[in-house]
Every structure is written in C-alpha cells, then in structure tokens.
Amino acid sequence: MNEPIPSDIEALRAAFAAERQARREAEARASGAEAMVAHLKLLIAKMKRDRFGASAERGRKLLDQLEMQLEELETAAAEDEAAANAASDKTIVRPFTRAKPVRGPLPAHLPRERVVLPSPGTCPCCGGKLAKLGEAITETLESIPRTYKVIQTVREKFSCRSCETITQPPAPFHPIARGRAGPDLLGTIMFAKFGEHQPLNRQSERFALEGIDLSVSTLADWVGACTSALSPLVTLIAAHVLAAERLHGDDTTVPVLARGKTITGRLWAYVRDDRPFGGPASPGVIFHYSRDRGGVHPCRHLANYAGILQADAYAGFNDLYHEARKPAPIIEAACWAHGRRKLFVLADLAKAPLAIEAVRRIDAIFDVEREINGLSAAQRLAIRQVRVAPLVASLEQWMRAERGRLSRHADVAKAMDYMLKRWAAFTRFLNDGRICLTNNAAERALRGIALGRKAWLFAGSDRGGERAAAMYSLIVTAKLNDVDPRAWLADVLARIADHPVRRLHELLPWNWRETRAEAAAAA
C-alpha cells in the first residue's frame, strides 16, 4: 500500500534525508559484506594453496597434469596403432603419421647379450649357397629380477705334524655381529627404508614374494645394528658441516607415535654448501630430531657455532643472534624466497597490483643472482655492489612509500612488513659474497622427508626419530656429493668393522667417490 506524499516542504526534506541516510547505510553494509566476501575468498584460496597447491611457484601442478595428459595421449595413440597393424597385414598409406620421439642409444655401460636368429643354410629362392653381407642389430632394454645367493665362508683347520698346533684363518668381520646378512643386502634395506621411504613391513612382504623369509623384527634388528655401526660417520659429517662459514637451517614436521596417538615432532636440517660461492669444501647436511619446536633445540644444535645462518624468521633462532651469546653471536641472513613467496601468493590469487609489482622487482634481483652463482665470494660481492645494490635500494624506497598508504590489516602490508622489519638481515648479502639469496638448500634437503611422510606415516618413537635423523644425514649427504647412497652404504658396511679409526674419513662420501674414481681409472 502506497503511503501518502506529504505536502509540507519540511516534511519532504525530512523524508528525503531519512531515505538518503538509509541508502548510505545499506551501501555501507553491502560494501562491508563484499569486502568480507573478498577476504574470505582470498583466505580460502590461500588455505587451498597451502593444503593442495604445489610447493614450487612455477606451475608444477599444472605441469604434472599436462605431462599426464601427454602420457595418456601417447599411450592411446600407440595402442591404436598397434591394434590397427594387428588387424591388417597390408601396407596402409596414411595421410598423416604420428611423430614419434627420437630414441637415443641405450646406455653403453650395460652388458650386451647377443641373440642370433637362425638363418637359412641355402637361398630360399634357388637353393644356392649364401654369403654373409652384414647384420642388422636391434637392441632391447631388459631387466633382471633381484637375485639372491648364500655365501659360505670356509675356514679350514690344519694341524702341524711336528708340534700338533692347530692353525685356522681368523673369522672375517661382518657388518652385524653373528648376523646372516651381507653388506649389499643391508645397504639395500637401509636405503629402501630411509632413502625410498619403504617401511620394513612392506619390505618384508616384498622379500616374501621373492621367496625370502625375513620378518619385520629381523629387519628391525639389522637396521638398528647398521645405524650403530655407521654412527662414527654421522659424527664426522656433523663436524664437517659445523666447520662451515655459512649454514642453511630449516625444519619440518614428523608425526611420532605416542601412547596410541601421534604427536608432532620436528626434524632439523643444517646444510653446508659452499658451491654457490666457489668454496672447495664438499657439501654435507646434518639432521637432528626433537619432540617439539622449542627454541632450545637450535641453540643446542649450534651451541659451538659462530658463523652465518641462513634461515626463515622463526623466533626460536633469535637467541642465536643475541650480542651476548657465547662463543659469539651468529650472523643472521634472511631468505628472499620466503619474502617473495608471501607476495607471490597475493599476486597469483588476488591479482593485487602492488604484490605483482613487488614480485617483478624481486625477480630482477634473482635474475642477476643466477648469473653469479658459482663465482668466488669476491666476484659475487663486486657484481652485487654494482648491479644488485641499486635494485635493492629502489625496492626498499618503493616498498616503504607504498606501505605508508596501506592499512596495517591489509594482506599486502603484512607481506611487506615481513621483509621491511627484517631489512638488515635481508640486505646482508650485499656486503658478503658468501651469503646466498635464499635458503633453498635447506628446503631441498628436507624435501625427501616431506614426500616420505605419505609412505611411512609416522616415526615409531623418539628413538626412531633420532635414528631416522642419523640415516638421513648419511643418505642426503651422499646425494649432495653425487654418490649412489645404496652402493656407498653397502661398501661402507662391508669395510667399517675393520677399518682403522684414524682413517675413517676415507669412508666419507666425497673421499669415497674420489677413491672409487681413481680405482676405476687404474683398472
């Protein structure tokens, strides 16, 4: 029902003012609702990205999908082609032939087995004598299932006819005292568990399918004994890592079984990698396990270290940077990849113009850093002073100016604050050629653990977490030095029992690799 229109001018003015005020309030509510919807959408997108998104920022998820789609198309095309050839023995001229990938030669180091097909003794046309013109060889790659054998070590006894003394060779050393497992088998089991993330129950099932009865308890005994035998090498690697001028540090979660439930433990990684600034020392990594993420743990791990630490902004590291720390404060170097990542998420999901511009400016710094990777520290420092320092100064000036116009609650402002509040740590690389731009070395060291969690689900106990940290230290260090971890573990387990302690360093991955290379060259 329509309300009567007032005839009084004052009444009209009051009605108009009330209507305008109501409209403003409605618009304000709508604007607030739209802002909240946008905020929630961004928050949900961030959570989905963290939960389901790829760890890399270059579209790894999309790339995987495209590669899978390509694989399906190639497989389907090959299947259709094979079916068509089987259905008809006639030569078919097709207007279009699917381009097949260029096949390279099979590895030359593999042994070759010649299978010569029987040829006719006489000419099938006239029965005449045949003369060999040559041969056509088709190579096929084949695999041989795992084979097992039992090695019998025989120690013959001899008796002296004169003094009746009995002589017998001494018993050889075994990787496991009174154990029945050879070093190659032990190396395979250890690498499968810690390098390929295959739990012992799955390994036991696999052995059973191959006709070998090895219970989980037996495998567990062997793993414990091998970990104990290899512990001196873990100590040597830790000493080598902590002697570095600069370390990368990071941690990741490890579910640990505790009284019928799981708790969240941590695995800490400290990486020495001097290759980015041309350092001669071999790379290495040491892992530590802890039941929680308290700051006391990195302080204990790095109690005697006084160099440079590249890490994220975890507050537990702050005590390491304190001026009163003994023997000396550790120098903090921030990770530009962490700072960029926060802005990249906003640029990718929210299409925020300021975030897009910040990422563009940071990427220009990364472009220069890629060019100087591997140069000496002095060369890197000289180039940074000329080419990188102006880019960093321009970025800071622009970021502080734009930050002043933003609300402190804005997501872009928070991402900028992450860098601006730690600007001294972010720009320390401009005055030291040894410092890297990112902490990616530590993240790469932890990547295998993050992937392996899906296979082994949790560590059985705190002791199991410590054991895993020790074995990860060995396996990841071997990989950093381009050494096959399985072959190295097998050889070390065969030799370490009777290897002189003063020459134990010869078994470290980088020395082992050189020794093997020299032996191969001599052979």
Image (cartoon, helix red, strand yellow):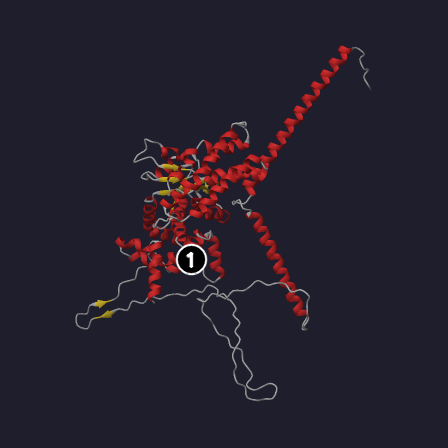
Q: Quadrant of residue 164?
A: bottom left
Image coords of residue 361 (percent x, y): 50, 39
Horizontal side of 413 relative to 125 (left or right) equals left
Quadrant in the picture for the C terminus: bottom left
The front one of 219 and 263 is 263
The front one of 124 and 14 is 14
Q: Is residue 312 above or below residue 497?
A: above
Image coords of residue 511 (percent x, y): 33, 55
Type of amino acid under label 1: Thr
Q: Quadrant of residue 30?
A: top right
Quadrant in the picture for the N terminus: top right
Please tell me which residue is depicted at 26% across the width and 56% down the height of the picture: 500
Q: How many numbered dots are placed on residues in this image?
A: 1
Q: Is residue 210 above or below residue 420?
A: below
Please tell me which residue is depicted at 44% across the width and 52% down the height of the picture: 195
Neighbor class of circle 1 (other Cα within 10 Å; few <14, some 14-19, many 20+) is some
Q: Quadrant of residue 518?
A: bottom left
The front one of 175 and 88 is 88
Q: Residue furthest left?
A: 163
Image coords of residue 317 (percent x, y): 39, 35
The front one of 145 and 126 is 126
Q: Is residue 33 above or below residue 456?
A: above
Q: Is residue 297 visible?
A: no
Q: Is residue 515 visible?
A: yes
Image coords of residue 520 (percent x, y): 35, 64
Circle 1: element type: helix
Q: Which residue is mark 1?
A: 188
